[in-house]
Amino acid sequence: MMILLSTVIAPSRVSASEDGELKIKETIFHHLGDGYGWEVPFSHHHRIPLPVIVRDNDGDWHCFSSSRVAHGEVYDGFYIAEGGGYNGKIVGRDADGVEYRPLDLSITKNVLALFISMAVVCACVFSVARWYRRNGYKAPRKCVGAIESLIAFVYEGVIKSTLKENARRFAPYLLTVFFFIFVMNLLGLIVIFPGGANLTGNIAVTMVLAVMTFLVTNIFGTKHYWKDVFWPDVPIWLKFPIPIMPIIEVFGMFTKPAALTVRLFANMMGGHMIVIVLTMLIFIFAPMGAAVTGATTVVSVIFSIFMLLIDVLVSFIQAYVFTMLSTIFISLAQENPHHDETQMIENKL
Amino acid sequence: MELFTPELGLIFWMFLSFAVLFIVLWKFAWPVIIKGIDGRADLIDKGVEYAQNAKEQLDHAREEADKYIADARRQQAEMLREADRMKTQIIEEARGAAQKEAQKVMDAAKVSIEQARKEAEQNFRNEVSSFALDIASKVVRNRLADDKAQTKLVNTLLDEIENKN
């Protein structure tokens, strides 16, 4: 860890002494954000090149390696913008010379991390599935047993206890969500390739997940659920002639996924940010002499490790919470006329 | 701020990967696993229930066996008593029958003895009367000769009768 940090100090010190805080802020957001290459340890110059796939304004697709534009070069009319509205993104120039953003489906760092997470989830889950195909009801041991107990924990503890007879119907979706988020979270905490991408701290990723839950909730919602939305059991003047309650209910339909999105995104991004800021402290204190830098380094490293350990816990908790809330939203839309139960769950929330 | 504006490319890939992952796992992995977990849970539940029942039955078996033994003892005692009662009854009956039979035999014997005695008496009387007639006739015949001789004759005749008997 120390060696790693000291090697990073060398190039950073130059930039830090040039325009101080601005660079630090950029570094933080660079680490939190996406990129067209994957950083490798001990070098700021080299990156693992990834394919860039863009469609220009004329509708032509361009595909090239990110190493061709990594250091400010222009390739095929595309380059990575420095500053401005499209900072750090691939941009092109149209016929009038105006900068524009092409349709960008590049395999960026985050997208590759997504694929890696997918592969890890598949490997984990299929190891358990293979065990059950081969061994029937026998309980798995060791690694497979650990994954299986995690599956059982989520399935028995969250899905089955909330959804009851509908558990089998929605369990595949909810378990996929849990493991996908959990693996993405954990991979994000590994500092070097194949981890380190701040995936679940990216609002696009969490938004897609939340939209999925929104779709599942509303597509499979029962008649009773829709009746509760548009004609809830409240005094008539609350829904007619001005539909106050229905408006609130419809609004609530959309705030639920929004809350899911922001909760996961903010938690994971916060964790990453704290660790980076703690590390950046070393470079902030660097100009103050060797003693101060040394002391800061020790303190920062200890705190970083502590925060990373907490983030491991948070990784699990956030995956669990996302799954649990999705389960509850789905179960609320699965309610058949049992009013007490609905009320109870809503009170719990 | 870049962090808060979702990137279209990432949304596209995220949606695609999630859809692919979900479909693959949904088709090939989760049903097997859930079936396994549920099945095993059921199996364990059933096993526990079975064991509980077995234990209960075992506990009951002791009691039941004791009950059966006691029952058997009671029945045995009853049967013995019954047998005893029947034995006495049979003996009683046999005794009664035997007495009756004996009575009958004795009655018949008495009757025949009486008859025999009567016949004998008759015979005896007939004989005595014939003897008496004989004696009387001989006494009458000798009277005329000698008193001594007559007495002697009578004694002789009496001796004869005595010897005959």
Image (cartoon, grey):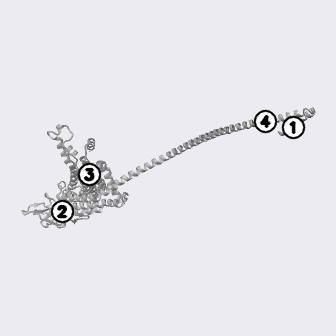
What is the chain letter for disc 4? Answer: B
Nearer the observer: mark 4 or 1; the answer is 4
x, y percent for residue A304: 29, 56
Check disc 4 and report the residue beneath it.
B126
Badge 2 element:
loop
Check disc 2 and report the residue beneath it.
A106
Badge 4 element:
helix
Q: CA distance from mark 4 to mark 3?
A: 146 Å
Q: In terms of image quadrants, where is residue A183?
A: bottom left
x, y percent for residue A330: 25, 49
What is the chain letter for disc 1? Answer: B
Callout 2 amino acid: Ser
Q: CA distance from mark 4 to mark 1?
A: 19 Å
Check disc 1 and report the residue beneath it.
B159
Q: Is there CB contact under 8 Å for labels 4 and 2?
A: no
Callout 1 amino acid: Asp
Callout 4 amino acid: Asn
